[in-house]
Image (spheres, helix red, strand yellow):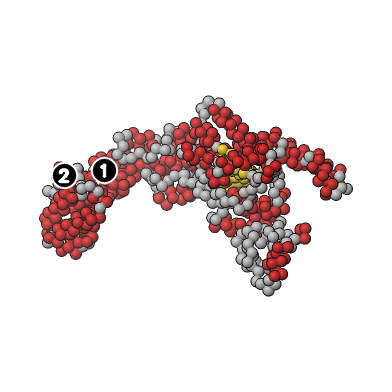
Amino acid sequence: MIDEAHRTQSSDLGDNLFEAFPNAARIAFTGTPLITERHGERKTHKRFGEYIDTYRLMDAVNDGATLQILYEGKTADSALSEKHAFDTAFEDLFRDRSDEELLAIKKKYGATGDILEAEQRINAIARDLVAHYVDNILPNGFKAQVVCHSKLACVRYQAGIQAALAARVAEEEARGTPDAELIKRLRFLKTAVVISSDGTNEPAYVTHARKQAQRMNAVDNFCRSFDMDDPDKANSGIAFLIVCDMLLTGFDAPIEQVMYIDKKLREHTLLQAIARTNRVKKGKKRGYVVDYIGLANHLTEALTVYAATEEQQELKDGLKNITSELPVLEERYQRLLQHFAGMGVKGVEAFATGRTPTQATDAAVVHQAVTALKDERQRADFEVYLEKFLTSLDIILPGAQAQPYRVPARRFGYILQVAKERYKDESLNLGDAGEKVKALINEHLVSLGINPKVPPVELLSADFMEQLSAHAGGSTEAKASEMEHAIRKHCTVHHDEDPAFYKSLSEKVDALIERHKDEWDLLVEKLAELRHEAVAGRQQGQDGMSKEATAFFEHIVQVSFASGKLPDADRPAFRAFMEVVVDLLQDTIGSIDFWQNPDKQKRVRALIKTEIAKTSIEEIKQNRERVAVEIMKLAKNRHSELTKGPKARAGQET
């Protein structure tokens, strides 16, 4: 049974093993394309037979075990163009020489190594690399691996990246309104070079870089999330892990989202290297490979290592150019438009793209859209469609291809915020859409005078009516709708404190809406009166009982009697029972740590059962256990009310 069957099994090691066990069943595992017959190597399946089972790259992506990788080529610079021309001319000039002679000539006069180690070229790439990282990767808190041609190139890349980071800090500080948070994050970022030792004769720059990485515990700290608030975790700021040959295979760091490659990699080494970016982590939607050396041809070559055309397609699907996300983004944008069009909202596309003629038209579209989202299922669908759209946009941002979708993102984000406010629906949020799009939308909301960090205004707020008028934009329908949902939310939040009272309040809301349907001005007036009742809460007792006894009386009646109503004949006895129980609770639950002490609760529950046994009401006696539990639950929810009266304070002192 062989693991990594693509590596050594077609060499002498494999031959010796199979000669020793000629009749053995041979079972092999490989996560890498199978070796071709090039250079006399035999395909792995010739030695081990056909596949027993396959689990391909896109299977893992579809299952959520790994992420799709997006490829971006950045090789159009003069140095590489000149190098390509040099290599072509060199091969033409010395076509009659042997491989050994060509190698000696190149070594003497310089070729690839000189180009890929040139400081000027490395510094230029480092500036581009840092810009890409800061704008695309850093906002979501992920990290980068940089793959270099040689150890010297690694050291020079470290210097180039550090210089580019310092330049970006200076650039941000020079802005009219510098982003203090971004500057803080940039100053926190670090680099580390992870390379192997050259033995006793290694250059000083290799020793210095290698020991620096060891002191920083670079690999472990690279795998950790950024932690700028803990001084002991300063090295969690290692954002760039710069390597030559190490950590290209078998290195799992889910926090790594991008690999910048400036080294010629081939076949399974190339494919295993780029797979460092596809590990799953919360908030990470894709892995990225940014190519500075021109690996497109090598990728194609690597794909052909797979024997079957179907398998080649699997890999191509798993490794796509970043532009492949654009059709997905467009499809998700259209799905959002269709969602509102399907609900009868007129002019939503013109609104989304900013092509409506007036602000009044914008307001009308927003009102239509938010009104259509009154149905909770429609709101849930909208949230799902918007999050998917914003996820695709976050992948493209800040690229120029994302430009047509910036305004729609802002405007749909605004609709989400208004719906969240009107329906008091805290579930409506931007979810895991990504920090880049969140910043885009929040900036727009702030420009409109909306602070997305402030939760929806609550019913009890002193400025509720003023805020309500501002949100409604002059629409009495919107005002009535927002007031309705504010009262409903208040009833839901406080229901357990006085279930009967808040159930009655909700029923009054239903009755008002049914009675004054489409009479928006009158409905606003009636709901405003009901708001005062909701804000005040239960103020006094009824039918000769105290306020607390009344709260328990109404709730226990609803849960204890099958009809939900108390027979008139039992009313006096039940009133007396509830007064006794409330006195008992006020005497006992105020003791220290009562609700953390099961023994104390058990004793009080037993006392309540004793009082139940004393009553003459048979239905209560039959439901003794449930009644005792419900009384204790309500007592816990009304603890502050029960323990703030004079009698309760006397009980606590006792």
| Residue 25 higher or lower than 70, as above or below | below
Residue at horizontal 88%, vertical 48%? Answer: 96
Give the secondary structure at mark 2.
helix
Q: Looking at the image, which is closer to me, 181 or 245?
A: 245
Dot 2 corresponds to which residue? Answer: 653
- Residue 6, position as x, y percentages in the image: 68, 60
Q: Which mark is residue 616?
A: none
- Residue 407, position as x, y percentages in the image: 53, 38
Dot 1 corresponds to which residue? Answer: 534
Q: Looking at the image, which is closer to me, 113 or 612?
A: 113
Judge left or right: residue 51 versus residue 94.
left
| Residue 167 higher or lower than 16, as above or below | above
- Residue 592, position as x, y percentages in the image: 22, 47
Give the secondary structure at mark 1.
helix
Q: Looking at the image, which is closer to me, 525 or 412?
A: 412
Locate residue 461: give its quadrant.
Answer: top left
Mark 2 or mark 1, earlier in chain: 1
Locate residue 309: give its quadrant.
Answer: bottom right
Q: Does residue 287 appear in this view?
A: yes
Residue at horizontal 56%, vertical 54%? Answer: 66
| Crowding at mark 2 (Cα within 10 Å: few <14, some 14-19, many 20+) | few
In the displayed orientation, state which residue is furthest to the front: 200
Identified by mark 1, the residue type is Ala
Identified by mark 2, the residue type is Glu
Q: Image quadrant for the N terminus?
A: bottom right
Residue at horizontal 60%, vertical 43%? Answer: 241
Tag in front: 2 or 1: 2
Residue at horizontal 41%, vertical 43%? Answer: 419
Separation (CA) of disc 2 from disc 1: 34 Å
